[in-house]
Amino acid sequence: MKPEMFLPDDYRPAEGEPFMNERQLEYFRRKLVIWRQELLDQSAETIDNLQESARSVPDLADRASEETDRALELRTRDRQRKLVAKIDAALRRIENGEYGYCEVTGEPISLKRLDARPIATMTLEAQEKHERREKVHREE
């Protein structure tokens, strides 16, 4: 494992520097690691909340409301689990030197897009094309 790189707190990847240089990769790696930890912390909170609310509620309306809340929390947790898997995949792409490049075209993904969605695997154009194809197939 390589030593941790110094990165100023106010560093933001810029278009003028070489694409996916060490600083940019470290910036995105840290961003992904922090996001992943936040999701795992929220997941632990969800488990605690579900264990606390597992008590028996005699009133039917209250019980129905609690079950609805529990189902919503479980759905949210499932989304978070899938997101953690995507973050792990992005971290692997950083390690493999594949991060920041479109999996369809091989072109660089814009820094603005990666900053907004660090798990992005396609350029905006490739993503839009993919979504249009998906929509056509759903309608058939």
Image: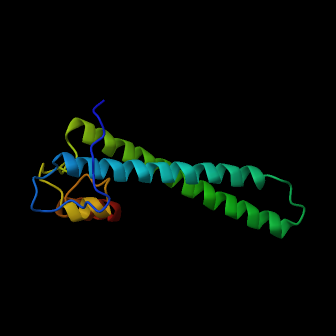
Q: Nearer the viewer, residue 13 or 9?
A: 9
Residue at 30 percent of width and 40 percent of height: 4
Any part of residue 83 in sight: no
Q: Position of residue 105 (x, y in %)?
A: 13, 51
Horizontal side of residue 104 vs 66, given as left or right: left
Question: In the figure, residue 133 lies in which quadrant?
Answer: bottom left
Residue at the extreme right of the image, as rendered = 58
Q: Quadrant of the C terminus?
A: bottom left
User: Where 113 sits versus 121, above or below?
Assistant: below
Q: Nearer the viewer, residue 17 or 87?
A: 17
User: Where 60 sits versus 51, above or below?
Assistant: below
Q: Position of residue 66 (x, y in %)?
A: 75, 63
Any part of residue 46 in sight: yes
Residue at the extreme top of the image, as rendered = 1
Q: Position of residue 84 (x, y in %)?
A: 44, 47
Question: In the figure, residue 60 lies in which quadrant?
Answer: bottom right
User: Where 25 sits versus 129, above or below?
Assistant: above
